[in-house]
Amino acid sequence: MFHKLFYLLLLVMLNFGCSKEDPPINKPAKHEKSFEIYKEAVDSLESGDYFYASKKFAEAETILPQIEFAAKASLMSSYCLYIINFYDEAIENLERFIKVYPADKNIAYANYLLAISLYEQILDEKKDIVPLLKSKEKIELFLNEYPNSEYALDLKFKLDLINNQLAAKELYIAKYYIQSQKWIPAINRLKVIVEKYSETIFIEEALHRLVEVYFIVGLLEEAKTTAVILGYNYNTSKWYENSYKILNKEYKIKKIEKTKKDDGLIKRTIKKLLK
């Protein structure tokens, strides 16, 4: 809910940030109704009646005289749907916004909200991979289009989480194949992690499992090569130790004792700060 309040703050800033764009006090009579509907939508938004606010923003969009106000009403309607978890409706509205108002100043935010709406539908990567892939695709498109946007950092973080979930799914399936002694499918799944998700937390175990499977099927050179890669990049990992034990049955890896660091300066500095 904290995140959604944050997005609300952004929308309020978009909505009221530029006073020069506010509706003029002396509005033409034929446009009075449109601004009254828009104001009613804003009041409903502020009171927390998001569903009604969404309907009124959508209604206002169709009759507002200026395109920038119509675009703003459309975006606000989408946000209201998002805040009450009407994701499908919000996504449909946002996709329409992007097509109808491609030059709007808030187009980056619309794409961001679209990516977030897809991301928040991710549940369990073991059950349904479609939301993961859709969210990943949209986030990558956003980062390519708006790499320096204020929203880019948040989406980069979410993309890392998605990649970890996808890697977890591949590893889960690979382990199933290993237990079933289906070595070729297991190797293929593990290679996906190595090739596509090498920056995730699952890369170390994936490399070890490759060593393990290669050794079982008699591909000793491949097992040794993979173990070298694992050792070069993660030589303090338990997975490297396990891989080494597979290839060297009688070898025991020596534990490296950590040298005590000279923290005298740190302690002296702290003492000075405490005086």
Image (tube, helix red, strand yellow):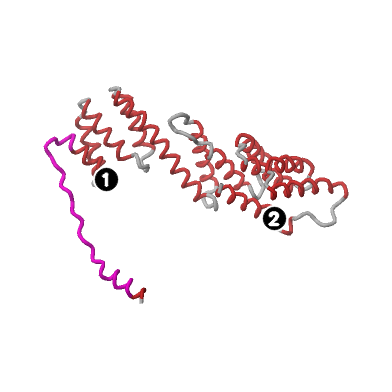
Q: Residue at x 33, y 26 (%)?
A: 176
Q: Secondary structure at mark 2?
A: helix
Q: Residue at x 20, y 35 (%)?
A: 224
* Tag shown at residue 146: none
Badge 1 element: loop
Between disc 2 and disc 1, whose residue precedes?
2
Q: Which picture quadrant has residue 219? A: top left
Residue farthest along the right direction in this orientation? 29
**What residue is shown with label 1?**
234
Range drawn in magenta: 245-271
Judge by depth and name the residue closer to the eye, 203 or 268.
268
Spatial separation of the CA atoms under disc 2 and disc 1 = 52 Å
Question: Is residue 43 positioned above or below 212 on the image?
Answer: below
Percent across and percent down for residue 73 are 71, 45
Q: Position of residue 229 (x, y in %)?
A: 26, 41
Apparent side of residue 184 relative to residue 123 in the rendered image (left or right): left
Q: Amino acid at mark 2?
A: Phe
Q: Which residue is tagged 2?
A: 16
**Compared with residue 18, is residue 56 higher up or lower down, i.e. above or below?**
above
Task: Point out residue 17 in the picture as x, y percentages from the top left corner.
Answer: 67, 57
The percent coordinates of residue 16 (x first, y second) are 69, 55
> Label 1 neighbourhood size at 10 Å, few (<14), some (14-19), many (20+)?
some
Question: For residue 243, what is the image quadrant?
Answer: top left
**Badge 2: few (under 14), some or many (20 or more) residues near its Cα, within 10 Å?**
few
Tag 1: residue type? Tyr
Left or right: residue 226 compared with residue 94? left
